[in-house]
Amino acid sequence: MDQVSPFFAALDSANLCWLLAGRYPFVSRTAGKAGWSPFRIEPFSGEDAVAHARKLCQASGLQFYQEVWERWCDISGTSSWLIHALITAAAIESAPIDSIENLGRLYVRELTSGMIGKWLAARLDQAVPDRGGRVMVGEYLAELARSGVSSASVSSLAPQVWDGLIAEEWAEETLAGPRILLDAIQRDWLSLVTAAAGASERAQSRMLQAFMFRAEQRRERPETTRFSSVIRQRLLDLPQSGFPESFAWTGQEIRIPKIVAVSPEITATAELFWCYGFYEDSAGVPESEVILLITVCDKPLADAQLQKWQRQLETEARLVPSASAAASSQAPHPRQELWVVVPPETTLTPAAFRTAILVAGILPDLGANGPRRSCVK
């Protein structure tokens, strides 16, 4: 369907009210050409998702177990479509969802041979119609899903392949070029469908093991299940509300920049908040630009991950020319700072202390509770 479609021509009627829904790449491209206003629909909150699961269970004749669905939302998010798919599958199988383990088994079955797996397979088929090319792309995506890096370069994928992946939301377009964008469900599915021949059952067992391990970790450390969600909105609101006037840990004053823009990013190990702003002098006059990367982590960090974030931060800074450098002898790029936010009682390695400002707690001044402790690089 394109702009010359009679369907789109009919939408030009001044007396017609309508809402066009679809995959964001298609909707945004179509809206841009037509001058329409696109917007993203916000995901359900945890409470909304659990209430949705309750209604679906009642409509399907299944017993509803609130704790199971609360734990599911903590582990896997609040996608209404995913909840609907799981409850529909349980109703067809007459399978009770009375424990997180039973829900995990159902999830693995659905990824392997059920509606969820077929939906993801259809999306990849649509993105890469050529069978041979699809095998190569599947291996490329699976390698990224497992390790975060791939032995193949981005340039190894043809432009038409990238167009398909972007259209089906396996990737996104950026000014620096296309990049793969995988959520947790896509990662899980890729790990199952790319298992070696004869190893499918072992792959399913590994998936269930990983699912249950995540579930037990969340139950043993309930304070981390809400870790990033507690402060997420406050971080996104920094351009409007700013940091608290007094911002210090263990007696150390930390110079706080004025933030003008925040861009969130979700990765396999943390939620990242790219904050762009500048430092001001005592009179409130901007002195120098800064890029502050705040990473919110639910578990201890590996030194390699910290180093990777530091390199990403340096790369991002190189993309932003410093306006102040033209009139002074300052460095040609904005200053970079990496802040790592971790749960209480997290063990921090010496390398971590050398790499970033760390907050062992949940940034209490931004709306959560926890001990204040930090180290400045």
Image (tube, rainbow, N blue to C red):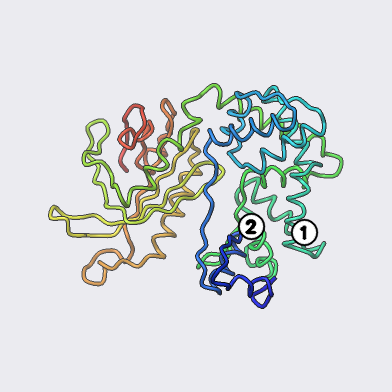
Q: Residue at x 56, y 23 (%)?
A: 219
Q: Residue at x 65, y 23 (%)?
A: 65
> Which amino acid lies under the numbered mark 2 shown in the image of this protein?
Glu
The residue at which mark 1 appears reads as 125
Residue neighbourhood size for the residue with mark 1, other residues' Cα within 10 Å, grouped as few (<14), some (14–19), many (≥20): some
Image location of residue 307, percent across then percent down:
46, 47
The residue at which mark 2 appears reads as 169
Q: Quadrant of residue 8?
A: bottom right
Q: Is residue 130 above or below residue 95?
A: below
Q: Callout 1: helix, strand or loop?
A: helix
Q: Residue at x 52, y 62 (%)?
A: 38
Q: Callout 2: helix, strand or loop?
A: loop
Q: Specify the quadrant that holds the C terminus.
A: top left
Q: Nearer the viewer, residue 264 or 49?
A: 49
Marks 1/2: CA–CA distance: 13 Å
> Which amino acid lies under the numbered mark 1 shown in the image of this protein?
Asp
Residue neighbourhood size for the residue with mark 2, other residues' Cα within 10 Å, grouped as few (<14), some (14–19), many (≥20): many
Q: Residue at x 75, y 50 (%)?
A: 119
Position of residue 295 in the picture relative to residue 333 (left or right): right
Q: Quadrant of residue 177?
A: bottom right
Image location of residue 125, percent across then percent down:
77, 59
Image location of residue 151, percent across then percent down:
66, 56
Q: Specify the quadrant that holds the N terminus.
A: bottom right
Q: Nearer the viewer, residue 250 or 271?
A: 271
